[in-house]
Each structure stands twice: as structure tokens, then as C-alpha cells.
Image (spheres, grey):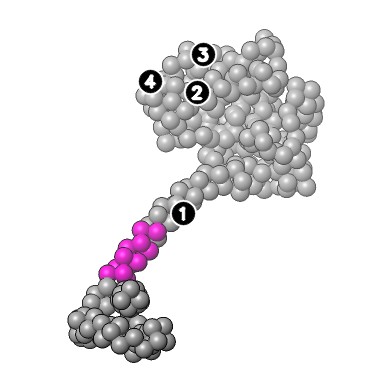
Amino acid sequence: MHVSREWTTHANNTRVSSAYLKRHLDHQIHGHESLHIEFDVLLSSSSPPKSRKSSTTTTMSADRARLSLLLALASQASSRSQQILMDLATESGKYLLPRRFESRNLEEALMSVPDLESPEFRVISRTDRYEIREVEPYFVAETMMPGTSGFDFNGASQGFNVLAEYLFGKNTKSEKMEMTTPVFTRKAQSDGEKMEMTAPVITKRSRDRDKWRMSFVMPSKYGADLPVPKDPSVKIKEVPRRFVAVSAFSGYVSDEEVKRRESKLRDALKSDKRFQVKEGALVEVAQYNPPFTLPFTRRNEIALEVEWKQE
């Protein structure tokens, strides 16, 4: 009796044919007639073939529905994951798959620039040592850097962090703004100078020759309607349209390198037939890349404001 019930249960679960089960039981119970009878009764008391087929079809339909639902949920989860990854890749790609400037030599050909917003400009002329640009107006957020160097690690880090806090929410609107490039480090002009805050970050030295200012270019979509900084050391200024002579170089920036390249740029501009260095122009340095960028792929620019020569 125990054997026939076990096989009957097995039959219901696996839906094997009664003929197959009978043959199997014949072999297992060695001709016990009562077990044969009971097995036949159990089989005959089950649903008729048509009902079993209908039940099986219903079960299979339910299983397929569950499977379809699981696949749909998995697909939806996969789509969301893919979208998140795509969004991350898009942002990371701005750094990992950067855009490039038109290069004049092998050094510039290896340089890369993150695919972030930068001030708009038009190239007026190019030589093998520099190019003249007409730069459109833009806004900057700037801060005075501590010490007398614009490029020592501590001073640069402090200036950068102050500006980054403003950009990422330390303002009256608690608004997070998009990063731009480059960062400008420049010898500071008078307080009346107007500058924009977009990429690059600019560091500029003050007229007393012992102070530098760092500035972030502001996203152009804000125009003059920028959030007010909570930190009083951060100033919002507008940089007017101007002409600048620009020379690009790779590697890390130092005070000595800036002095050397400024001297070379001033010498080169002496022979320019159309432009001359504007009186009182102070050097500024643009750095386009994040700190983890390899030195030989970094793009830095040294710039001097110029003007048309009088005929």
C-alpha cells in the first residue's frame, strides 16, 4: 500500500502516463494483486483526461505568466541600471573621453580637455608659438589666494575648495551648479575689473606682485543672475570681451614655469604685426584638467591681454 501511494503522488507531480507507472509498479511489487487494484482505483478516481489537459494548460499558462512577469521586472531593473550607468558614464566621459583643441605641435596633440563648458572664443590668428583669441564676455567667481604663490599645493587647494563650495551649494539659493573648465589663476587686477566664472579656473596675480586670485568660470545659462556667495571672500565678477595671446603647455604648473613662459610670450609678441601687449597686462594661467590627469596629457595655457596696433 505504501509503495502504490508513493508512486501515485509521483505520478501526479510528474504527470507520467499510467501505463508507464503500471509497468514500473509491476516490477517493484512483484505481482501483489491488491496493490494493482488500489493503483487502478486511484488512477480512475482522478480527473478525466480532458480535465487533466485543461488543468495542465492552466498551470502552464500561469507558469508562463509568472515567467513573463519575472522577465519584465528583470528587464525593467536592467534598463534602470543601464540608465544609471549611462548617466555616470556620460559624466565620467567628460573627463575620460575629453575633447581636444586644434594642435600646432606634438605636445599639443597629446593634450586633452574635459568636455565641460568653457568661455567662448574665436581664433583671430595663429603662429607656431601662440594664438590670438577674441574671447566673449563671461562671469567668474573668484577668491584671493593665501601666500605669494599661485601654484603651491596648500594655497591652490584652499582657493579651489572655497570656490568649489560656492559652486556646489554654499550660496543663498543653496543651488548646485555645473562644473566648468578651465580654472584660472591670475595676477589680480584692480577691484573694478569684471570677470566671469566658467572653465577654466584662472589664477591671476595682483598689482602688488605678491597676491594671486583663483577664479571659476560660471555656467553661461545664469548670465548675471548668479546665486550670491555665502562666503564673503568669494566675489562674482564679469570679464568683458577682450583679445588675448595664448600659449599652451603640458605638465604641472609652477611659479618658475609661468615666469619663463610669460617672458617667452612677451618676446614673441614683439614681432607680431597686428597685435601688441596691452599696457599693464598681467599674466593669467588656465588649467583645464583634474588633478589625476597624467602630466603629458594636461592642457595649461598662459595668456596676456593684447590690443590692435595703431596704424
Kindly identify the amino acid type of the residue bearing the numbered disc 1: Gln
Q: Name the residue carrying label 3.
A: 233
Say what secondary structure mark 3 lies in. Answer: loop
Q: Tell which tag, 3 or 2, sits nearer the viewer.
A: 2
In the image, residue 126 lies at what x, y percent?
A: 70, 43
In the image, residue 102 lies at what x, y percent?
A: 67, 48
Residue density around tag 4, few if under 14, some if 14–19, many if 20 or more, within 10 Å: few
> Magenta stretch?
62-74
- Residue 299 is left or right of residue 231, and the answer is right
Marks 3/2: CA–CA distance: 12 Å
Q: Are marks 1 and 3 in contact (CB under 8 Å)?
A: no
Q: Name the residue carrying label 4.
A: 172
Kindly identify the amino acid type of the residue bearing the numbered disc 3: Ser
Q: Earlier in the sequence, mark 1 or mark 2?
A: 1
Q: Earlier in the sequence, mark 3 or mark 2?
A: 2
Quadrant of the rendered image containing residue 199: top right
Q: Residue at x 48, y 23 (%)?
A: 166
Residue 234 covered by magenta stretch? no
Name the quarter where the N terminus is drawn: bottom left
In the image, residue 26 lies at what x, y percent?
A: 38, 88
Q: Name the residue carrying label 1.
A: 82
Name the quarter where the C terminus is drawn: top right
Marks 1/2: CA–CA distance: 31 Å
